[in-house]
Structure formats: structure tokens, C-alpha cells
Amino acid sequence: MRTLADRLGCAIGSDEGAAIVLLHPASDTGVSRAVAAGARLLMDVPVLEEVQALLGGAEPEPGSLRLSLASGSAFRINVAMSLCSGLVERGWLHPGRQVDVELCLHEAVVNAVTHGNLELQRCADGDSGFADRLDSVYYQLTLMPFAARRVVIDVGRRADGGLTIDIQDQGKGFDPTAPTGGTTYSGRGMTIMRELAERVSHRDGGRRLCLEFRP
């Protein structure tokens, strides 16, 4: 049987020059450097067999970019900052758009981890609410199936030079048409994304958030 590397015709390894980069452990610097160097797929798994299992037969296309992280990694590192800085160096993102894209991506990843994979409700306002939320996140990350769930980010380039970014979680989903409030899935984060992105939509029962940005 041909290996994944043979089938893709590309390098697989832990260095940022490989087409498929295994992040073990995931880090801000590792993500940024690998994206800037042109990696197609980044995953925080230590062995190739896990990459093959998670791909499920799908192969990353040239010119594509996918980042797949366990919930703990996605919460621990600054995914938005490292990914966007790498996209700027790669030539996919104009520096003048970096702040807007980074802010939207940060909100999207936080929602995917906390509300999606960990199934936590929106926290109360204030310092005490934030502290309680952190405690809940760290506790949920010690439990199954929450700890095994992943956040997958797919980045594509539009013909006009804009970006499409899909953020997918493995939670139960939610109703994106429901009014926002203290007990709903999303709050101010969705408002920010709708103001800064060209288009915001949901698919797969609310598990996939699709963002589009002008050049």
C-alpha cells in the first residue's frame, strides 16, 4: 500500500517546510512558520497513522490550507494570531486586513471550543464570570468525549484575492437564527464577526462557521 506521503507526492514531518506538518506540541511559532512556508495541512498529532485516520481518505489539495487541532491546543495557543501572521507572510492576507480577520477568527475559535466542543453556555459578565468560565473550560478538557473533539479550520483564496475561512467543531450544533442573549450559543462575538467580515454563514446544523473577507 502506498503511504500518504507517496500518494500526496509531498513531505510529511515536524518541520515547517513539509506539506503536512505534525505539530507536537502545537505552538504559536510552529503554526505561523508552517503556514508561511506553504504547508497544506497542520495537525497536532505525534504519529502519521493518526493523520491518516483523521483524514479519512481525503487529501489536501495544492493551494489549500487546513489546520486541525484538539480542543486543548486550540484553547491554549493563539490560533488566530499565529495563523494570520503566517497568512500574511505567505501572501494570502494583506497586512491591512490582518486585524479584522484575526479578531473574527479569534472569536470563531473561542466559540468552536467553548460552546461547540465543550458544550458550555455563555458566561456571565464581569471578572467572576470569566474566572468561572476558565475553570469550566479546564475541567471539561479533562473529560471524554470533550477532550477528543477537534477544531478544523479550512482557509481558501477567492479569485478576487479575498479569503474564505471555515471553522468547524464537533459539538451538538445550535440554531443560528435564535436571538442572542444570556443563555444562547453566541453573544458579542457573532456581532463582531458580522461587522468585520463580508459574509457570515452557518452550515452543518451550526457546527461549521463560514467567513468571507474582501481583499
Image (spheres, helix red, strand yellow):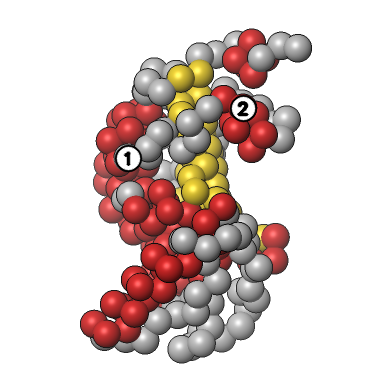
State yes or no: discs 1 and 2 in contact (Cβ < 8 Å). no
Q: What residue lies at 55% left-to-right and 13% top-to-bottom? A: 10
On residue 147, the disc is: none
* Figure check: 101 above or below 162: below
Q: Position of residue 79 (x, y in %)?
A: 37, 48
Q: Position of residue 123 (x, y in %)?
A: 40, 81
Element at badge 1? loop
Pointer 1: what residue? 27
Element at badge 2? helix
The amino acid at mark 2 is Glu
Closer-to-camera residue (133/202)? 133
The amino acid at mark 1 is Ser
* Figure check: 149 above or below 52: below
Pointer 2: what residue? 49
Q: Looking at the image, is mark 1 or mark 2 earlier in the sequence? A: 1
Q: What residue lies at 71% left-to-right and 35% top-to-bottom? A: 56
**10 Å crowding of disc 2: few (<14), some (14-19), many (20+):** few
Residue 193 visible somewhere in the drawing: no
Quarter of the N terminus within the rendering: top right
CA gap between label 1 and label 2 equals 21 Å
Q: What residue lies at 48% left-to-right and 31% top-to-bottom? A: 46
Closer-to-camera residue (90/206)? 206
Residue sitting farthest toward the left:
127
The answer to whether 200 appears left or right of 92 in the picture is right
Quarter of the C terminus within the rendering: top left
The answer to whether 197 appears left or right of 159 in the picture is left
User: For the residues carrying marks 1 and 2, which lies nearer the camera in this image?
Assistant: 2
Q: Position of residue 137 (x, y in %)?
A: 41, 68
The answer to whether 203 appears left or right of 180 in the picture is right
Q: Position of residue 11 (x, y in %)?
A: 50, 14
